[in-house]
Amino acid sequence: MSANATPRPPRLWDISPTVAPDAPIFPGDEPYRLRWTARLGPGCPVNLCAVTMSPHVGAHADAPLHYASDAPAIDVVALEPFLGPCRVIHAIGAAPLITVAHLRHAESHLPPRVLVRCCQRADTAWNPAFTAYAPEAVEWLASRGVRLIGIDTPSVDPAESKALDSHQQLRRHDLRVLENLVLDAVPEGDYELIALPLKLQGACASPVRAILRELA
């Protein structure tokens, strides 16, 4: 590169699905709905909408309150885990559970954030057979200093789970989590993660606009 060349900006990967009325959600959860409360016209200078939805629609961060009644809501969790060095690990076809064996090939010098891609293509309709984390894999990542984990399916626990063993591992180790990511186009490797939750008072989760930024 010549001395006068303009540096290329770091590449960004948008790893958030579009939040829409047909976005896949757990059965019984509140879907995304948008209604207009004002429209541009005579006597009205703006378009104005109102939105209702579960905070678990689309890419989102669970609060500890989601899986423990005496735990913090999303508005009081620390932001540091949601911003910084991150590794994307491929475990495509790992169904039904991501195990330690699927992660060992990428364990050297793990950063504090790990996102696992287990789908060839993220589901665009509800799929109850989605891949989740084995609780032992969550514990293994925590033992290596990981503070946030993510996945490109709706949950770190299987759809039919009532014990939520992997969520309980998050609670025990004070880990944060991102779910419903889209990692289809992201090569395995290291990035900067930016996925800040909204400051929703008392909420069990928050939508995020999750992105990965190429490291300099």
Image (cartoon, grey):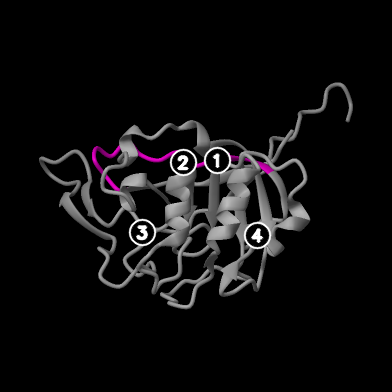
Earlier along the polypeptide chain: callout 2 or callout 4?
2
Type of the residue with mark 4: Ala
Magenta stretch?
191-204
Q: Tell me if I can see residue 209 in this picture.
A: no
Q: How many angstroms separate mark 4 from mark 3 (CA)?
A: 21 Å
Q: Which residue position holds label 2?
A: 174
Task: Name the front one of labels 3 and 2.
Answer: 2
Name the secondary structure under disc 4. Answer: loop
Q: Is residue 198 magenta?
A: yes
Furthest-right residue in this view: 2
Checking the image for residue 57, the label placed there is 3
Q: Tell me if I can see residue 54 in this picture.
A: yes
Where residue 160 appears, as percent x and y from the top left, is: 39, 74
**Residue 167 placement: quadrant:** bottom left
Where residue 125 appears, as percent x and y from the top left, is: 43, 75
Type of the residue with mark 3: Val
Q: Are marks 1 and 2 in contact (CB under 8 Å)?
A: yes
Name the secondary structure under disc 1. Answer: loop
Classify residue 121 as left or right of residue 197. Answer: right
Q: Are marks 3 and 2 in contact (CB under 8 Å)?
A: no
Type of the residue with mark 1: Arg
Q: Is residue 81 above or below residue 130?
A: above
Earlier along the polypeptide chain: callout 1 or callout 3?
3
